[in-house]
Image (cartoon, coloured by chain):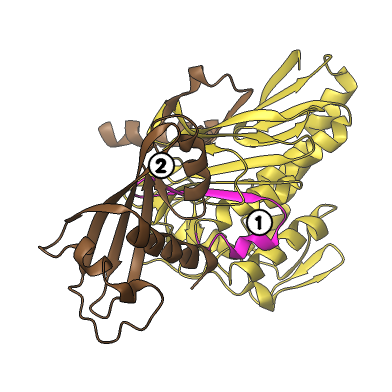
Chain colours: A brown, B yellow
Amino acid sequence: MNAPTRVAQAAVFTLIATGTLAACSSSDSSSLASQGSSSQSEGGSNSAMVFTPGTYNATGQYPTPGGLQGIGVTVTLEADGTITELEVDPKAEIGNSVQFQAKFAGGIKSEVVGKPIQELNVDKVSGSSLTSGGFNRAIEDIVKEAQE
Amino acid sequence: MSTRWQFEALGTQWIIESPESLDKEIKLAVWQRIDEFDKTWSRFRPDSSVNRLRTETSVDLGPDAVELLGIYDEFYGTTAGAVNPLVGVSIEQLGYDQEKTFTPKGDPIPAPSWADCAMEGSILHTPVPVVLDVGAIGKGFIAGKVADLIGGRCVVDASGDIVNRSGRPLKVAMEDPRDSESAIAVTDIPDGWSLAGSAINRRTWGKDLHHVVDARTGIPADSIVAAWGAAPDAGVADGLATAAFFTDLETLSRFEGWTLTLDQKFWADSFDFPGEIFN
């Protein structure tokens, strides 16, 4: 597919190879940790392996000077081990890692959490306040009509 | 930016900030520039040039035609037809029509092929009568032209299409579509650049009915809920914020600029985004 996906796959295998994975399955009893611990996951052919298809969540942890950091990964696997979907959810809350992980997750995917705009000290806000006055009024008219 | 001029045009709130208040002559020129644009391109004005294309197949679309439709050409190619100025027929089929009935007329219909149209100077030739809608790029485009007209330092904000000519980076928050008091990301827009945003929870008139429509199918976008684009050109920034609903963000990287999207689960995706995403 595209480059971000390839980067994402590399990231997951790095985590499997180096991280302490606390795996849990969201769809069945299989465990990513046991599947991922196979040495064959490091770029070799995995044609002999059988995977239970499903969506798996895992959290990897790693030490940093600022303390232990975590990163969450969700993958959707097919029976032949093909990753059909991957999302990375940075969970770090301490020190520099927040910023570094935000950059890492950019280009992959990460869930957003709103921050109060008042705290951000920005010049401008861009986004959903895009509704035009004319459009609003037209919709209001329709709603009124519907209520009559 | 110390002074602020606020007005309504193109059915949208405009805020123009500048170090000193703008002359009356400049304000009049800005107003006329926007009105001329509206007279040419609005599909809601019965006397507009684009509305003649509903019955005629060759119409002069004026001084902005070559540049504006040229940007459409680029996006039409890059998005494999998802962004197409002939999408008006699809949008009207969904109910966002001249009479603003907001009642779907039937099943979605795709737009005619833009590749079958031809430009001869500022005259557009179409094989069949069409409904032209420049909503994907037009507002950003004219916001950039207004900044050009002012000439000096300014920030033009046409309800989300923001043109930064302030002489310094502009710090901008991306509003959370779930909560207008919150932001999901923050970035600096360099001097000379523009930012545009689009969200499908705005300009909505029914379940799954909104203004961001895939011209290939005539169906509103459903996987992305909000998108932003930034570029040195204000029209391109607006185009990116629409194209990102339909196109792999890496494909859009052929344009100088960046894109940021939120999907239905409020997961962010981005390409070359230079700011901070809150997650």
Chain of the residue displaying label 2: B
Are both tags, 1 and 2, on one chain? Answer: yes
Q: Which mark is residue B20?
A: none
Q: Is residue B107 above or below residue A141?
A: below
Residue that protrudes farthest toward the left in the picture: A29
Between B101 and B157, the one lying in front of the other is B157
Number of numbered markers:
2
- At label 2, counting other C-alpha atoms closer than 10 Å, the crowd grade (few under 14, some 14-19, many 20 or more) is some
Q: Earlier in the sequence, mark 1 or mark 2?
A: 1
Q: Which residue is mark 1?
A: B51
Is B211 placed left or right of B167 in the picture?
left
* Identity, as a three-letter code, of the amino acid under mark 2: Asn
**Range of the magenta residues?**
B246-268
**Quadrant where the C terminus of chain B lies?**
top left
| Residue plotted at (27% across, 66% down) | A36
The quarter holding residue B54 reads bottom right
- Badge 1 vs badge 2, beta-carbon distance below 8 Å: no
| Disc 1 secondary structure class | helix
The quarter holding residue B50 reads bottom right
| Residue plotted at (51% across, 54% down) | A107
**Quadrant where the N terminus of chain B lies?**
top right
* Identity, as a three-letter code, of the amino acid under mark 1: Asn
The picture places residue B126, in percent across and down from the top left corner, at 70, 73
Answer yes or no: is residue B47 visible: no
Q: Which residue is mark 2?
A: B201
